[in-house]
Image (spheres, rainbow, N blue to C red):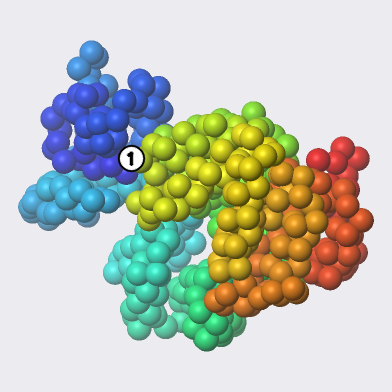
């Protein structure tokens, strides 16, 4: 996105590679491959959905420039200067350059998401609604509470203009559903109710509306209801086999129920590349959990170039290094202050560095201290508790791992501080390579039975990866 904005800002002038590095990579040292890869992706967008609107030209041994088509409808307004914000930067560019690049910018910002207006009847949906739906898609992909509120406000505006527009109802419900999992108990319940009401309204207006199915599936808690989620998502996928949102949701569900190998297939079916940050983070996780380590390394390198400091991408890369035999590389990530997510405090970074040191040592006082620190943190924070389960298992402390799992999933032994909704806990932890010692313990069968996973496997006629012919 930043490269496209920089090219558009130049208004047809040439931008050198050095200029691009300074503008888009904060001056960090990057190889020619990184720039070539971005340019290749921009060209694919220009040749696809952006066909005829713009092109990226290479000026040999000099740099690049953006060439805009001159006969595109709807661009006859004055070529005024406008202000565009991208991340922490503010640019001025001409309206014409911005509009020619708008389609490509949407694809890049949304990543795997499908366009809101792809299935609209152009004769009945106004340009204002089409623009609002596209704006909502881009805003939602920023993945923050502020962006969620803004996205919901846009959908509500759409529905005042087109109250019977099924996609708007479904996508509004889908947005409520996503964020219902990460809010306080009372707010979460309200958002889930809104998600379900909007999803049902979408299906009343259009019984085949995939976003209504998505809203109702995603609104369900992480634990339990797996069979209902599975049926809704597969019904939606049958109607739109290439819908990136459905593929992403199915991939995540498969990881929750221990079928990471199937999950990777769904992520790889998403046609629009690059994947958006959240999808990239989960794809990395799925590759690791399915034992495809070489592919995981390639995906991590790719994601690091595209989204180096995105919290989810960075966190999953860190844990992949930490728990897959490369704690020194994980420690190096923590020590790279400029390459860390902005929200990561020095204190938290030091704790993560201690975990890497502990796994380097494996035993002795450093490992013991790191585990004790994480066990204490587990009582105060859900994420810390999940990390502690992995750490204990990695250090061969299986008894502690099961004690933590019982507290994490059932509040047995002690209750984790804060929100105590046990049905919103992460079951992907149980199927990671690092927790293999737990899966080899007789207590694991009782754990997945109590969680309800065993019942889902029986009802769906499926088995998790670790019970396959070549278990992890």
- Density class for disc 1 (Cα within 10 Å; few <14, some 14-19, many ≥20) is few
Name the residue nearer the viewer: 204 or 280. 280
Q: Position of residue 219 (x, y in %)?
A: 60, 74
Task: Let me know if residue 26 appears in the view.
Answer: yes
Image quadrant occupied by the N terminus = top left
| Residue shown at 81% from the left, 40% from the top | 472
Disc 1 designates what residue? Answer: 338
Q: How many numbered dots are placed on residues in this image?
A: 1
Eyeballing the image, is 339 above or below 89?
A: above
| Residue shown at 38% from the left, 27% from the top | 34
Q: Position of residue 444 (x, y in %)?
A: 85, 58
Is residue 110 left or right of 356 when viewed as pictured? left
Q: Position of residue 403 (x, y in %)?
A: 76, 63
Eyeballing the image, is 12 above or below 369?
A: above
Residue 213, picture quadrant: bottom right
Name the residue nearer the viewer: 201 or 231. 231
């Amino acid at each position: 996105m930043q490269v496209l904005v920089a090219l558009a800002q130049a208004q047809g002038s040439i931008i050198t590679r050095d200029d691009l590095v300074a503008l888009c990579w904060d001056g960090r040292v990057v190889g020619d491959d990184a720039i070539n890869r971005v340019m290749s992706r921009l060209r694919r967008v220009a040749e696809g959905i952006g066909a005829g609107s713009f092109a990226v030209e290479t000026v040999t041994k000099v740099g690049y420039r953006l060439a805009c088509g001159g006969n595109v409808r709807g661009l006859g307004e004055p070529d005024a200067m406008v202000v565009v914000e991208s991340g922490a930067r503010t640019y001025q560019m001409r309206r014409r350059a911005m509009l020619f690049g708008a389609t490509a910018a949407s694809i890049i910002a949304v990543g795997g998401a499908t366009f809101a207006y792809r299935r609209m009847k152009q004769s009945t949906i106004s340009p204002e609604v089409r623009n609002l739906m596209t704006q909502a898609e881009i805003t939602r992909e920023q993945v923050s509470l502020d962006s969620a509120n803004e996205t919901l406000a846009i959908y509500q505006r759409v529905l005042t203009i087109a109250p019977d527009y099924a996609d708007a109802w479904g996508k509004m419900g889908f947005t409520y559903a996503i964020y219902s999992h990460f809010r306080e108990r009372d707010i979460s319940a309200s958002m889930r109710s809104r998600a379900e009401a909007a999803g049902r309204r979408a299906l009343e207006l259009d019984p085949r509306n995939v976003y209504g199915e998505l809203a109702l599936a995603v609104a369900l808690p992480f634990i339990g209801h797996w069979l209902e989620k599975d049926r809704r998502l597969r019904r939606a996928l049958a109607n739109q086999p290439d819908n990136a949102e459905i593929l992403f949701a199915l991939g995540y569900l498969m990881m929750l129920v221990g079928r990471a190998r199937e999950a990777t297939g769904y992520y790889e079916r998403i046609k629009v590349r690059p994947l958006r940050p959240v999808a990239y983070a989960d794809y990395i996780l799925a590759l690791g959990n399915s034992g495809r380590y070489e592919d995981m390394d390639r995906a991590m390198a790719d994601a690091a170039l595209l989204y180096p400091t995105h919290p989810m991408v960075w966190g999953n890369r860190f844990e992949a290094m930490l728990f897959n035999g490369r704690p020194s590389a994980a420690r190096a990530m923590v020590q790279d202050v400029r390459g860390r997510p902005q929200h990561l405090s020095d204190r938290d970074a030091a704790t993560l560095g201690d975990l890497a040191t502990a796994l380097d040592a494996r035993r002795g006082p450093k490992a013991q201290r790191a585990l004790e620190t994480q066990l204490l943190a587990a009582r105060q924070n859900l994420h810390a508790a999940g990390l502690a389960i992995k750490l204990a298992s990695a250090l061969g402390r299986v008894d502690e791992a099961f004690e933590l799992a019982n507290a994490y999933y059932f509040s047995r032994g002690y209750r984790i501080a804060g929100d105590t909704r046990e049905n919103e806990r992460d079951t992907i932890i149980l199927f990671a390579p690092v927790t293999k010692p737990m899966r080899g313990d007789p207590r694991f069968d009782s754990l997945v039975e109590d969680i309800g996973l065993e019942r889902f496997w029986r009802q769906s006629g499926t088995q998790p990866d670790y019970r396959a012919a070549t278990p992890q």
